[in-house]
Amino acid sequence: MTVQVTVDGRPTKVPDGATILDVLRGQDIDTPTLCFSDNLTPVNTCRVCVVEVEGSRTLVPACSRVAEDGMVVSTATDRVRHSRRTVLEFLGSSVDLSVAPNVADWMDEYEADTNRFGPNVATVDQPVKVQDDLYIRDYAKCILCYKCVEACGVDAQNTFAIAVSGRGFEATISTEFDNRLPDSACVYCGNCIGVCPTGALMFKSEFTMRRQGTWDESAQTVTETICSFCGVGCSLELYVQNNEIVKVLSPLDHDVTSGHLCIKGRFGWEHIQG
Amino acid sequence: MYAVDPRRTASAAWADVWLGIDVGSDIALANAVGHEIIAQGLHNQAFIEGSTTDFDEYAESVERYTPEYAEQVAGIPADAIRQLAFEYATAQTAQLCWTLGITEHHTATDNVLALINLALLTGHVGRWGSGLVPIRGQNNVQGGGDMGALPNKLPGFQNVEDDELRGKFEAKWGTEVPATNGWHLSLMFEAMERGDIRALYVIGENPAQAEADVSRARRLLGDLDMLVVQDIFLTRTAGMADVVLPAAAAWAETEGTVTNSERRVQRVRKALEPPGDARDDLAILADLAGHLGHDWGYPTAEQLWDELRSLSPMHAGMSYRRLEEQRGLQWPCLDEQDPGSPFLHGRLWAKDPGDRGRLAPFSPVEWVAPADELSDEYPIRLTTGRRLDSYNTGVQSAGYSSPRRLGESLDLDPEDAARLGIGDGERVRVISRRGSVEAPARVVGGLRPGLAFMTFHFPDDVDVNTLTIDAWDPKSGTAEFKATAIRVEKV
């Protein structure tokens, strides 16, 4: 079964059930996304992927809206560009997006000016939470996209150690009773790090190297191998710099665990380096 | 989802129902489930008649295993057993998954057969979503067996004692392969005891800490004329060796493949240069062959894999190119057009009886109690297992700092702790018929009175395997790590 949709004036046939984002990716139309991940259920919080759909009063999120037969989609109208620019400006003025992949390029593309609200704008700046040797939480970089909450919950780990607490500008990702991470329900699978789009959740190794000024992505290799710790067969992407593993991710499109790991696979590699 | 486990583990908490079973009573439970399914007429008559044999013998064997009898043996209420039987038999699809709680018993193979009987009884096998799933504890337990690291099999599960199959390997390798089955681990230790094994070459295993009744294992290893250990660590076993060959870590420092629990062969790749003198296992073995007068050259992992494919039909279709493109293939994969096999035994459902091949036999099995009996002197059942953030004897997992790690402890049920007057955190002496250790007690939920738990992740601190019994299953050679009789004393 296929449906016919028109994207920026070009008609195209796509499989039934495909989202607008699937269609745009199929046509190599660059679409910013922050709260979307291939291995999570869309939650539509960031609104940076919005497109215009003929007949729809509001802009629609491309990541979750399913393409319908006869749908006419526009991705480059002033309304779309203005909305994306405003979202990026709101986020960029209040949150530290300095290590968020791709965001700087989107800021240029949509001519976002994060200084337009003036110098005294409220931010979510706060101290980094460093509570163990495995990963850190830097909520000055958090855009509340919910991806970590989803990965901790029904989309992957079913541990439910974190949720959004508070309202409005005070909203933050929190453990139960805001306990320190080692005293919380966290099982340290690190699946939240795997999906975080802004570096708010980061391997301690990466955090330390960035502080020391030794983090150098251009000097890193990424090698896909299989975790040694059990019989599930999770794929690991080993990020290696100077012959040392500096972080471990897992490919989202691998059907064994769709990018998710456990504490041993994600953090248990130190035994092979001095 | 039912979790049948002596302990209320995280999986049990997640399941719809937890059945807290007494350690070592699995066959009594499985046979009672079979009894109930037959008594209620819920067995799959058509499947049994068309695809299995020996049903009558099985039905007769489970006749005495009433749910009430199993309640006496296993400690699970008869009504809960009836409910399990009903839900398993009437489910559209159902899987029986197990790990070492089934196999680390002196009745290991019979435990597995008891589960296979249930799958045959209900037809929950050979169909998408239904089956029998042994979950493996390392990334290549399955692959080790696939590659013939078993005393009676050549690569691809081809019988050593089959002249034609063995002849195929002899022709390819240009050498004679011993024509009789070898020894599994437990028989090897017996052979050491008799003096029939005087030299041992251990690759990637730490028996001086991992064996049941480890004091005996250490004595036998120490009595050898020569011990060679090839490992990525200087383990306790390596510390006893005459020669240590430092190896590269296969999963991150070498090329090759591993096979996971679902029979999926996947590529491991070299991401790091190994430290110091550590070398790829292949290079070490090739050098050793050279010193023994055989020039193997230095074949690549892919060249060796291609040789394997030429000898093992179930791997024949798995070229490195396909393994990489498809991120792994599940055996059997007979040729390069074969997409691999997500599940086995589908043949049992073939429309034409002639296509079903060898029918699946029921195997009647009887429950036998654990070898290490409870008594007035040793009244508590100790079972050992793993924790999420640690791994076996701890040599790998000790390398990273886990906020969840508590170290070794004797976990006790609150009732037992109160009866013995032991407080949380108090040091206790744990005594079995073979040895004793000291450890802090932890009073925890999730156990039941009479049941205690320890890991074996910290053998340098607490040598738990001095307690365990090496009574082993005559068919698989696996020792009964899961059932030790102990008493606990305050220190």
Image (tube, coloured by chain):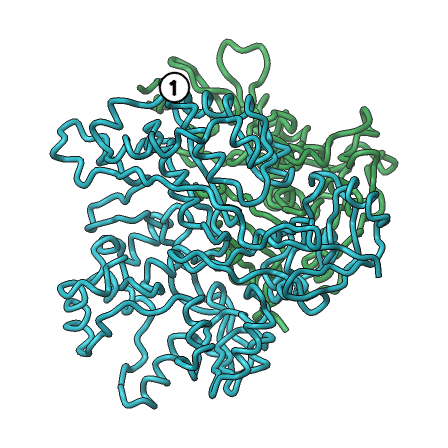
Q: Which quadrant holds residue B488?
A: bottom right
Q: Position of residue B56 (x, y in %)?
A: 27, 30
* Residue B349 shows in the view: yes
Q: Which residue is disc 1 drawn over?
A: A5
Residue at 28% x, 31% y: name it. B55
Viewer-closest of A51 and B114: B114
Whether residue B124 is situated above or below residue B328 in the rendered picture: above
User: Quarter of the image holding residue B93?
Assistant: top left
Depth check, front residue: B80 or B89: B80
For the N terminus of chain A, the image quarter is top left
Seen in the picture, residue B218 relative to A45 is either above or below; the reply is below
Residue drawn where x is 43% and y is 78% of the image = B194
Q: Is residue B184 left or right of residue B470?
A: left
> Who's green, chain-wise?
A
Q: Is residue B80 left or right of residue B357?
A: right
Which residue lies at the image location 50% right of the left edge and 40% below the top edge? B26
Indicate the amino acid at tag 1.
Val
Of residue B45 and residue B389, the one placed in the foreground of this image is: B45
Residue B330 image position (x, y, % from top left): 32, 47
> Looking at the picture, does residue A256 appear above or below residue A239?
above
The chain drawn in cyan is: B
Query: Do we see residue A270 in this rendering?
Result: no
